[in-house]
Every structure is written in C-alpha cells, then in structure tokens.
Amino acid sequence: MDRLKILVVDDESRMRKLVRDFLVKQNYEVLEAANGEEAVDVFFEQKDIALVILDVMMPKMDGWQACREIRSYSKTPIIMLTAKGDERDELQGFELGVDEYITKPFSPKILVARVEAILRRTNLLVSEDVISAGGIELNKAAHQVRIHGEDVELSYKEFELLTYFMENQGIALSREKILNNVWNYDYFGDARTIDTHVKKLRNKLGEKGELIKTIWGMGYKFEV
C-alpha cells in the first residue's frame, strides 16, 4: 500500500522537522510548507494529500486563510496548530471545518495519535488494533495483553515496549532506536532504562519472555 501523504505547514523549520520525524517513523510521506501561500500551492499541485497539519500564525497567508482556500475545494482533514488557547480561535476553526485543534506546546506523540484517529475515521487508515505472535495477543485499543487467553498485567511503558517489539518482529532493534520510539524524541536516558524494562517484561510474559532475544552489544529482537 502506498504511504499516505501529510502536508505539514509551519513557518518554524524546527517545528516542521519535529512533526515530520514522528510522522515518517509511522510510515507517512511528509510534504512541507513554510507559509499559507506555499501550503495552498503544494496542496493543489499534489491533489492526493490525505491530511493537512496547519499552523495558524504564519507570514504571507495565515492558517485561517489557507484553511478557507483548501476548504473551498476539498474536504481533506485539517488539524490546526496554534500557540493561543483562545476559545474564539477554536470556534472559528470548527466553523471553517477544521477536524482537530491542537494548542502549542504539544506532544508529538499525541499529534500522531490524533492524525491516526482522524485517518481511521475517514477510512484512509486501516487500524491494526490486535497483533498476535507466538501465542501472545496484544490489543492496542483495549490496552490488553493475553497469553493463552489469560490476561497479563503490564505497566504503560511495558505495554508500549511489547507493542514496538511485536510490530517489528524479526528486526534487530538498537537501544537508541528503542529509546527514540518507545520513550521520547528528546529522551537521552541511560540504556539501562531499557534493560530494566525488558527484564520486567520478560518476567511478566513467563515462558513467552524468551521471544525477546538479546543481541549482545546492540539491543533486542522479538522473534517467534
């Protein structure tokens, strides 16, 4: 399946890079624009953009005007980003047909979750909420793990770690990659954090803990 295209519009290059990096990790194709005029040009050149993330305060043409231009021709989902927490702005956004409204500063992980929720609502993204491998069944929507029908109690981070392992079966994952994906974009913690969590996760998974293999000097691999 072709990767879905997302247009990220913000006059701050640092913000665009932050959002782009998170979306690329989730296998989206990301297009960028630095102002409203550029955004409208890119949108109509491409024609198959699945979603637009649009900053409000920008030079040349602000986010509201860019939103009006896009909305006059297209129902493509739009998420507005703004530094203001003004209710009037929010109401204006919804009147213009904005799908989501996120106030800066925000967590990029939350933004990605909103993107995926909107794309699921518009049937552009097929949700794989249940992953099964090696006798482990993980339900992302219910935040539930079962082995042979029995529930396994995991902490939030242990659940995220297991999800990441199961979604990347057979792939050798370095500690750095695991930190970036499971913890946080800006997380510079000690690699021992991962080792501690893996040890706890293995214990809770019982005999299935053996599916998480240690790759000495590098990291881990989930292999059935």
Image (cartoon, grey):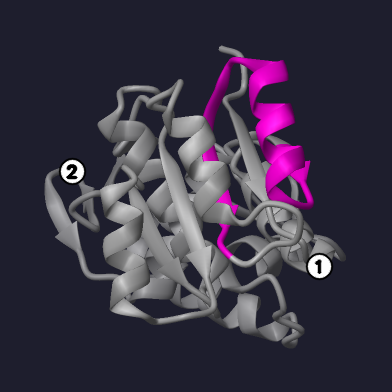
- Going 46% across and 21% down the picture, which residue do you hit? 73
Q: Is residue 42 shown in magenta?
A: yes
Give the number of marks. 2
Q: Is residue 91 above or below residue 193?
A: above
Q: Toward which corner of the image does residue 16 lie, by quadrant?
A: bottom right
Can see residue 16? yes
Residue 161 seen in the current view: no
Residue ID at (37%, 69%): 89
On the image, which quarter does residue 123 sit in? top left
57 and 181: which is toward the camera: 57
Query: In terms of image quadrants, where is residue 88?
Result: bottom left
Q: Dot 2 surroundings within 10 Å: few (below 14), some, or many (20 or more)?
A: few
Disc 2 marks a residue whose amino acid type is His
Using residue 205 as the reference point, say whether residue 147 is left or right of it: left
- Give coordinates of residue 165: x percent, y percent: 54, 50
Q: Is residue 208 above or below residue 148?
A: below
**Image spot of residue 5 (x, y percent):** 62, 28
Q: Residue 192, image x and y in percent?
A: 70, 84
Judging by the rendered image, the residue that carries numbered circle 2 is 148
Q: Where does the N terminus fall, quadrant-wise?
A: top right
Above or below, comparing residue 70 to residue 141 in the picture:
above
Task: Give the residue drawn at x 51%, y 32%.
Answer: 70
Query: Circle 1 sits on which residue?
Result: 14
Choose the circle earlier in sequence order: 1 or 2.
Answer: 1
Crowdedness of circle 1 by 10 Å Cα count: few (<14), some, many (20+)?
few
Q: Which residue type carries mark 1? A: Arg
Q: Is residue 165 left or right of residue 39?
A: left
- Rendered location of residue 174, percent (x, y): 78, 58
For the magenta stretch, what is the residue range? Answer: 31-56
Distance CA(mark 1)–CA(mark 2): 46 Å
Seen from this angle, which residue lies furthest right?
Answer: 217
